[in-house]
Image (tube, rainbow, N blue to C red):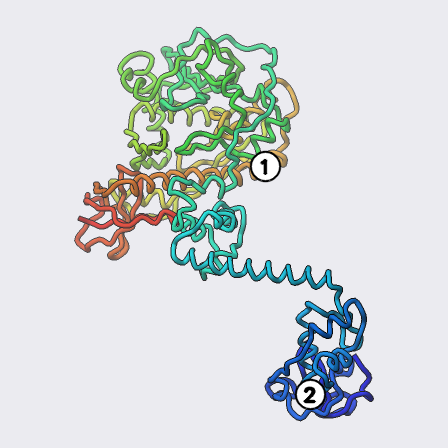
Amino acid sequence: MLDDVTLQAGALVLYKHRPALVRAVQGKIELEVQGGKRVRVRPKDVVLLHPGPLEDLAALEALPSGEVEAAWELLAGGETTLAELTELAYGAYTPQTAWAAWRAVCDGVYFEGTPEALRARTPEAVRALRAQREAAAREAAAWEAFIVRLKEGRVDAADRTRLAEVEALALGRARTSRVLRALGRHETPENAHALLLEVGYWTPEVNPYPARFGVDPDPPCLEVPDLPQESRRDLTHLEAYAIDDETTEDPDDALSLEVGDGGYRLWVHVADVGALVRPDSSLDRAARERGASVYLPEGTIPMLPPEVARRLGLGLGEVSPALSFGLELSLEGELLGVEVVPSWVRVRRLTYAEAEARLEEAPFLEMHRLAERLRARRAAAGAVFIELPEVKVRVVDGAVRIRPLPPLRSRALVREAMLAAGVAAARFAIEHGIPFPFATQEPPGEHPELEGLAGMFAQRRALKRTQLRSVPAPHAGLGLEVYAQATSPLRRYLDLVAHQQLRAFLRGEPLIPPQALLERVEAAEAVAGAVRQAERLSRKHWTLVHLMRLSAWEGEGVLVERRGYQGVVLLPELGLEASITVPEALALNQSVRVRLGEVELARLEARFTLL
């Protein structure tokens, strides 16, 4: 900065770090800047480089040669001015040489400061700066070579560290990527995933979705307390069956049935997790953070330490502790009464296939008949039954196994019993004023009335989202006046909360109040939603990996939706929905044969064509 009396027209000054020519000094200073534009500024906005006269800024374009390094050697470690430096380096102090000297100062290697007060750096400082610049130049060259290799679809061993930031974006641990920016690609997890596959940094077998949705890959590692000593009803005389998939490692529900002249007593025994996991304990907080167990094709990540399932899983020991729901039902399946008791049960484990083979014998025959009556009652109440083909996707020793799930009656039996237990738990909570996580759903939106798989597909699209509330309300999709999930406390946090409330009531202990319960519901639902996404996308990922490993794939499909020439074809063998261009003559529910085209794994897209 300087006073305006020291400036004259024709002086060379710095304005916003660029050269400017003083054209007039009348109060404010009139400057000509590069490009010929004129501006009026205050004296404090400029710094004098040379008093002039300078006729034209264009005269600065040809920089004179000088001996800047020699001047620095004379001045090393000392102070000087721009005028003195210019004389030493260029032999004369002119506007052109002053600008050249200032450019050398701005380079920063030899000098630092302002035109009025410059300091020549010490030799040690100059060596350090040179080393830094040389290293930066080497890094810039290496970076450019790295980007060239990526564009060519190849990398070398040293590139792996540079790709770590791309991996972080692909895994959802970062939001930006310098590498993708340099390649001109949008900075998305999908693009990061695609690049890692292109250059071979990742193989197709890397499943990014659990990490991307924040799933902890390791089970909780916490101390599990002993089962408390308390009174339990002895129900070991009942035949109790835990019916699950053959791969289930955490059996948390079992069934018993007593048949009388006037009705049934259905017992649904549930792993008594609330006996071990008290509200706000370390185990409870860990389960709340996870929301649910994660069921991936690669394996299961439990919500609770595995020791909890080993101690409480039904049928894993000779006798198991349970929280048993006793449902008094009429012959038509109407719920007449409920009791909830801590119990001891003796459980036998069966697979769905084993139970299916025994449906014509006691007690499974009566269980099946009761399940049909319970289903009929729900149907009369407007329940929506969607039975689209399902598959189970597993990865065993690196091999992807996709197995269609047959619509077994034993599955329907268990499903109806669990729904009945959910109704019973909700009714018990309402009758005793227990704050509870009720599952509710509004009636579905309008949809076309169609038959077959196309009708079920349309119904599924029309369903409203299930909401969890502390106030009871109907669940329209299930055809139930009240409902709460309470039969899977080993693997769903809100089922555990329901058990904690029931256990506290039975013990005469304080209940979780409604507002605190609602906070638990909201926190758990947010996490559980991410878990469901991770599970769904992981299944699709491994399904596409399976298709990529095949030299070709052809299979049967069913047209379930169409919009003009674009249709959705359901592929039952794979559990996939494919968007395919279809001819106008193809009708809904019509079977077609399709062939796999291209798979874009990073975008979870597979393209099929009609045969």
Furthest toward the top, the residue is 237
Dot label at residue 12: none
**Quadrant for the N terminus in the image:** bottom right
Q: Residues within 10 Å of mark 2 (few under 14, many from 20)?
A: many
Three-letter amino acid code at the position of disc 1: Leu
Q: Position of residue 366 (x, y in %)?
A: 32, 16
Q: Is residue 141 left or right of residue 34?
A: left
> Which residue is label 1 attached to?
518
Instruction: Indicate the quadrant where residue 443 lies.
Output: top left
> Which residue is label 2 attached to?
21
Q: Is residue 289 left or right of residue 149?
A: right
Q: Position of residue 304 (x, y in %)?
A: 53, 26
Label located before the other in sequence (2 or 1): 2
Query: Residue at position x 67%, y 93% from top?
Result: 55
Three-letter amino acid code at the position of disc 2: Leu
Q: Give the camera-side residue of 326 and 20.
A: 20
Query: Residue at position x 42%, y 18% from top?
Result: 254
